[in-house]
Image (cartoon, rainbow, N blue to C red):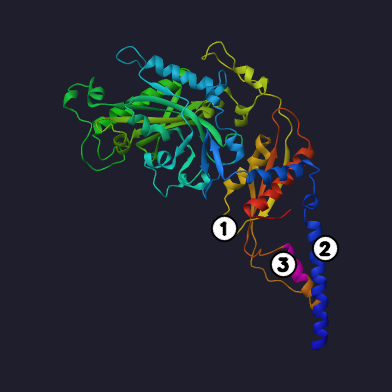
Amino acid sequence: MYQRSRVHGETAMTLCCGLRSFFQFFKTPVYHQQTKPRTLRHVYFRSLASASSLSDSVELFGKLYPRDDYTNVTPKILSKVGKNLHNQKYHPLWLIKERIKDHFYKQYIGRFGNPLFSVYDNMCPVVTIEQNFDSLLIPFDHASRKKGDNYYLTCNHMLRAHTSAHQRDLVRSGLDAFLVAGDVYRRDEIDSSHYPVFHQMEGVRLFSNHELFANVPDGEDLQLFEKSPRTPQKQETHTLEAVKLVEFNLKQTLGKLMTRLFGGGLEIRWVDCYFPFTHPSFEMEIKFQGEWLEVLGCGVMEQQLVNSGGAHEKIGWAFGLGLERLAMILYNIPDIRLFWSKDERFLKQFRVSHIDQEVTFQPLSKYPPLINDISFWLPSQGYSENDFYDLVRSIGGDLVEKVSLFDQFTHPNATYILPADYLHCLVWICMQLFFFPSRTEKLSHCYRITYRHMERTLTQEEVRVLHKALEITAEQELGVVGRY
């Protein structure tokens, strides 16, 4: 009996090894067996491998940032840095920025006839972690700090996630009223309204005791500060009278701005919300074409932030808005990728004789989409959806219109019925281990990827090469196990 089992065991082992080699041969991509790249797919992977090992540092604006465990910025994102769409004349983002700037220049005049608000639209997007988070009182455990949501150059430097990263430093320079416009970077989902690089514009206004109460009867008896409990209406350091006047000035200022952009008769409503750097805080919604739309966030600046800028005797407000958001609403632009288009059919529509000239965007021809699915088993730890979205953007670029997670599946703890025959049982186990390793209770994601070129029709072959590259790179970079 033992001799028979030994022979069967040797036969089974030989067969299993043979099967494994046989399956491995067909499972190994052909390009691994090539000495020279022969197709676009092979060239892509050769270049991807060489690009990843070229340097131990990230270079931006002539400065080197040594890579560390936090570095996650990709070549695709780095290629966008410095484009400054908001400063390119006649670009739709430039038009929105100029209209906002013109409004503040004309509406708010200083004592000597000069504009009250100064404008900064060319500040370096590389900031420290302290500038981006700590200076704005964002808690260490706040979700916005996550590596998966930001682009880090090192553990100490990043591409700014908001223009507010410059707020404290500009207050510290002695400014009481300013606007900041610039490109900001966030890892996010992929659809027609989200892009990893977008543009913000924000404003700050500070008031002294005299400036705030100058037009109030008996204003000389009123004060900005007191020590009292924090309430939903005010901070612990502010008087209620001061907060109400600042809040009124803020809402009046922003109401006039929206009327300038969207025209008279605009319905506006304010929604209470939370931001770490303002209290009380609000979101502004406008009713446009019958629909309520959120257009900006704002609030009374946290006094601790104002004090850190050296303006201890002043109180102020701040707001922030997205230029793409406003442009998409105003000009009815359907896809955020269009802002990066160099297609003259798009750009020439915004070459206007005056920044307030009305623009009715004429959609470009919409080319047919190509849709492919990708599914894989997730690793036990370390997977982030934003990592996958970033990988898709790195490989597919602006050819990817949308990525949606449309199915999730958790593999159960299954009880299998094994074949009765000893030899077949071993072969079955060998095949299970090879094709479906460690699946029990693993989570599977299935994503639907929509490819669409904005200027021409994509071919199936083009998309097949990209999608295959995505499948292979996802396994290599994210540690997933494909189900394709």
Label 3 neighbour load within 10 Å: few <14, some 14-19, many 20+: few
Q: Secondary structure at mark 1?
A: loop
In whole angstroms, how far apart are the C-alphas of marks 3 and 1? 21 Å
Outermost residue on the bottom side: it is 1
In the rendered view, would you say 243 is above or below 344? Answer: below
In whole angstroms, how far apart are the C-alphas of marks 1 and 2? 31 Å
Q: Residue at x 81, y 76 (%)?
A: 423
Eye-nearest disc, 1 or 2: 2
Q: Secondary structure at mark 2?
A: helix
Identify the amino acid type marked 3.
Answer: Leu
Q: Which residue is mark 2?
A: 22
Res 253 quadrant in image: top left
In the rendered view, would you say 243 is above or below 65? Answer: above
Residues in magenta, as a range: 428-435
Q: Is residue 325 visible?
A: yes
Residue situated in front as seen by the camera: 352 or 132: 132
Identify the amino acid type marked 1.
Answer: Gln
- Give how far across and how far down residue 309 sits, in percent: 32, 34
In the rendered view, would you say 146 is above or below 161? Answer: below
Q: Which residue is mark 3?
A: 433
Q: Is residue 434 magenta?
A: yes
